[in-house]
Image (tube, helix red, strand yellow):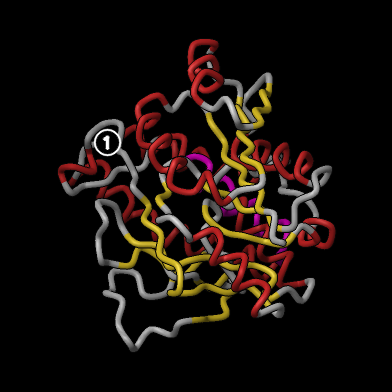
């Protein structure tokens, strides 16, 4: 019998709480245990989570450990439990009823796969693919995702082996973490799953995506930018994306990779400056991004 343990992290996301609760109600009857890791939220939000999720296991961290720290707390707890499968589901991922059960069945039917992830569509139940796995570049560890912007049709394989899947929606068997090890908490967020899957592939673990299960990333944009059709990353996202670009190169690459990365960023920087200063007028984002690059390149994290 499959025993699925779900891990979800939380950190003061009151703006999407109601949506999260409705998505949880879709899959709650399929899980062995639902674990929420609170990443140092304010007391009021913690109480709100405790009051609603009375049947869930809630782990409250004193401070925000980022995605990596939150997931690690969930993994450590899961490894002490009598579960067979562990799945990470971030709050804004919608899975129809039966999806978790089917994912665990696939892992039994296809034991060669150590990681399974559904095809993920854009929000508002869109028919357009947001991601269907991807490949980790051997040059600078950046991800090239498959079928982004495509409609699902017969030309897209039902199963595809990849080297990367979405970190907010994937299932593994319990022994995966015994082989690969925990998340690198120095990454904090943005790039954390790249590090995990790169190590998994090094261990010979096969990663796969499937169209047998559908998922929607129902992202809510706090500032409303998404409603205008223009999506602007937060300053936090820009900083960690830039910082971890060089952190991952230095961790997994060689001097050749580092030279390539520096050249690529110098080539991309004028486009970045044009976008945020002259087109969208967010000059602060340029400074944040450059700061992230400098920290990742020159400082020991």
Image side of residue 275 versus residue 20, left or right: left
The x and y percentages for residue 7 are 62, 43
Residue 134 in view:
yes
Residue in front for this viewpoint, 276 or 88 = 88
What residue is rendered at 54% in x and 46% in y?
A: 29
Query: Mark 1: which secondary structure?
Result: loop
Farthest residue in the bottom direction?
Answer: 155
Tell whether position 236 is magenta. Answer: no
The x and y percentages for residue 185 are 70, 41
Image side of residue 135 versus residue 223, left or right: right
What residue is rendered at 43% in x and 55% in y?
A: 97
Instruction: Decide: few, some or many residues near mark 1? Use Cα within 10 Å; few <14, some 14-19, many ≥20.
Output: some
The x and y percentages for residue 25 are 44, 41
Look at the picture and state if 77 lies above or below 178.
Answer: above
The x and y percentages for residue 1 are 72, 62
Mainly helix, strand or loop, the magenta region?
A: helix
- Please give the residue where the numbered disc 1 appears in the rendered image: 282
Give the magenta-colored segment's residue range.
Answer: 238-253
Residue in front for this viewpoint, 259 or 131 = 131
Residue 295 in view:
no
Farthest residue in the top direction?
Answer: 43
What residue is rendered at 66% in x and 23% in y?
A: 60
Tell whether position 252 is magenta. Answer: yes
What residue is rendered at 52% in x and 51% in y?
A: 168
Q: What is the total number of numbered labels drawn onto the structure image? A: 1
Farthest residue in the left direction?
Answer: 228
């Amino acid at each position: 019998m499959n025993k699925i343990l779900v891990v979800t992290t939380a950190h003061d996301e009151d703006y999407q709480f109601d949506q999260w609760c409705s998505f949880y109600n879709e899959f709650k009857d399929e899980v062995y245990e639902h674990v929420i890791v609170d990443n140092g939220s304010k007391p009021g939000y913690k109480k709100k989570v405790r009051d609603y999720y009375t049947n869930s296991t809630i782990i409250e961290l004193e401070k925000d450990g980022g995605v990596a720290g939150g997931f690690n707390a969930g993994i450590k707890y899961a490894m002490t439990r009598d579960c067979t499968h562990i799945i990470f589901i971030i709050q804004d991922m919608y899975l129809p009823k039966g999806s978790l059960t089917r994912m665990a069945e696939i892992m039994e039917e296809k034991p060669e796969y150590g990681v399974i992830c559904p095809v993920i569509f854009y929000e508002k139940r869109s028919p357009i693919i947001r991601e269907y796995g991807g490949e980790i570049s051997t040059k600078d560890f950046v991800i090239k995702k498959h079928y982004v912007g495509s409609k699902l049709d017969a030309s897209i394989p039902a199963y595809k082996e990849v080297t990367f899947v979405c970190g907010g929606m994937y299932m593994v068997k319990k022994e995966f973490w015994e082989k690969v090890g925990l998340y690198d908490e120095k990454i904090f967020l943005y790039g954390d799953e790249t590090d995990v899957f790169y190590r998994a592939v090094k261990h010979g673990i096969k990663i796969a995506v499937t169209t047998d299960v559908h998922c929607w990333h129902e992202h809510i944009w706090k500032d409303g930018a998404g409603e205008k059709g223009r999506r602007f990353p937060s300053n936090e996202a820009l900083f960690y994306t830039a910082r971890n670009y060089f952190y991952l190169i230095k961790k997994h690459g060689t001097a050749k990779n580092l030279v390539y990365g520096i050249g690529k960023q110098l080539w991309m920087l004028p486009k970045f400056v044009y976008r945020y200063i002259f087109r969208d007028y967010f000059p602060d984002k340029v400074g944040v991004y450059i700061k992230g690059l400098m920290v990742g390149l020159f400082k020991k994290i």
